[in-house]
Amino acid sequence: MKVRDLLRDWQQGASSRLTARDFHVQLPLHDAARVLALTELFPGRTETQLITELLSAALDELEAAFPYVPGQGVVSEDDHGDPIYEDSGLTPRFYRLTQRHVQALEQELAGHD
């Protein structure tokens, strides 16, 4: 999700599935003030919901910003028949690590049911 899409979701009241794990953070003063301002603009949202959704959007944008680093293996060809090389940068490692943590967090959730 992109940050600009948050406004639409906040106005529609959309929400997503949460983990059983809490993450505690201390925000810089100005960021905390902005979160509090958002709770006034969108009274149907809690501070935690806003922070969660902002963090999710920022992580999506960070993931999209990982640079492509061509590896050795050819995974496909483009429309002109030129090889497309596997990505040997941060993206595939990030995907693997994320999937591993998704599975662990899902097990934690299943243990809380």
Image: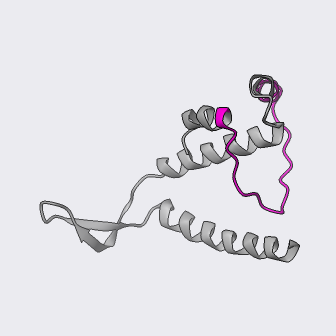
**Residue drawn at the location 49% of the way across and 61% of the way down:** 91
* Relative horizontal placement of residue 86, taking residue 103 as reference (left or right): left
What percent of the width, then of the height, locates residue 68?
39, 56
Q: Quadrant of the N terminus?
A: top right
Between residue 74 and residue 8, name the one nearer to us.
8
* In the image, farthest residue toward the front: 12
In this rendering, would 112 be left or right of 105? right
Image height of 22 relative to 112, above or below: above
In terms of depth relative to the viewer, which is nearer, 96 or 3?
Answer: 3
Which quadrant of the figure has residue 25?
A: top right
The spot of residue 48 in percent (x, y) is 82, 42
| Farthest-out residue, left | 80
Q: Quadrant of the C terminus?
A: bottom right
Residue at horizontal 54 percent and vertical 45 percent from the top: 61
Vertical arrangement, residue 90 with respect to residue 76, above or below: above
Does residue 45 lie above or below 76 as drawn? above
Q: Main secondary structure of the magenta part?
A: loop
The magenta stretch spans residue 33: yes
On the rendered structure, is 55 left or right of 72?
Answer: right
In the image, what residue occupies the spot 16% across and 64% down?
A: 82
User: What span is colored magenta in the figure?
Assistant: 11-36
Of residue 89 and residue 48, the one placed in the foreground of this image is: 48
Image quadrant in which you'd find residue 104: bottom right
Horizontal and vertical percent for residue 11? 66, 32
Tally the marks. 0
Q: Is residue 65 left or right of residue 45?
A: left
Q: How is the image coloured?
A: one colour
Image x and y of residue 22, in percent = 85, 56
Work out whether residue 111 or residue 60 is closer to the camera in this orientation and state it.
Answer: 111
Q: Residue at x 86, y 49 (%)?
A: 24
